[in-house]
Image (cartoon, rainbow, N blue to C red):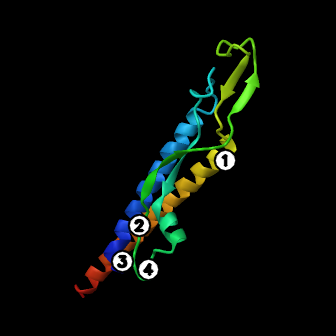
Amino acid sequence: MSLYNVFDIAGTGMSAQSVRLNTTASNMANANSVSSSIDQTYRARHPVFAAEMTKAAGVHQEGESVGVKVLGIVESDAPLQREFSPNHPMADKDGFIYKPNVNVVEEMANMISATRNYQTNVQIADAAKQMLSKTLLMGQR
């Protein structure tokens, strides 16, 4: 693996964590939204990363560098929160309102994890840059 591949891998990692942060922010922003229909209720979204799927399938070959690829964003299958609130303006004809299946504590943990992963990828790219700079300076002496 070339040292230049480190920049590619760290870049894909930063891009993937950026997508993860955006989906987490979207989930947090819609955590308290209310709907009168189960079909219109916001559902938590999560990105799917290709590196994990490739690793799980055993396709990865040793010595090959693989970055992280975002395959897409999927909606959570967790049940929505149904609450009886007949006086709520968004209540359906039976008096129920529907809330998203967003767990705020879980989303905060995802946000902290994504932030730290992003920060780690930045540090890896910075360390690789410093190693390349030091290597170039070795020729000047």
Give the CA separation, mark 3 to mark 4.
26 Å
On the image, numbered disc 4 is attached to which residue? Answer: 61
Q: Residues within 10 Å of mark 4 (few under 14, many from 20)?
A: few
Ranked by sequence position, the earlier of labels 1 and 4 is 4
Ranked by sequence position, the earlier of labels 1 and 2 is 2
On the image, numbered disc 3 is attached to which residue? Answer: 131
Ranked by sequence position, the earlier of labels 3 and 1 is 1
On the image, numbered disc 2 is attached to which residue? Answer: 67
Q: Amino acid at mark 4?
A: Gln
Give the CA separation, mark 1 to mark 2.
26 Å
On the image, numbered disc 1 is attached to which residue? Answer: 106
User: In this orientation, which residue lies closer to the viewer: 69 or 74?
Assistant: 74
Give yes or no for contact between labels 3 and 4 (Cβ–Cβ under 8 Å): no
Name which residue lies at 35% across and 68% down.
7
Give the CA separation, mark 3 to mark 1.
37 Å
Q: Is residue 120 above or below residue 109?
A: below
Q: Position of residue 61 (x, y in %)?
A: 43, 80
Name which residue lies at 34% across and 77% down.
3
Q: Residues within 10 Å of mark 2 (few under 14, many from 20)?
A: some
Q: Quadrant of residue 14?
A: bottom left
Give the CA separation, mark 2 to mark 3.
20 Å
Tell me the element at label 4. Answer: loop
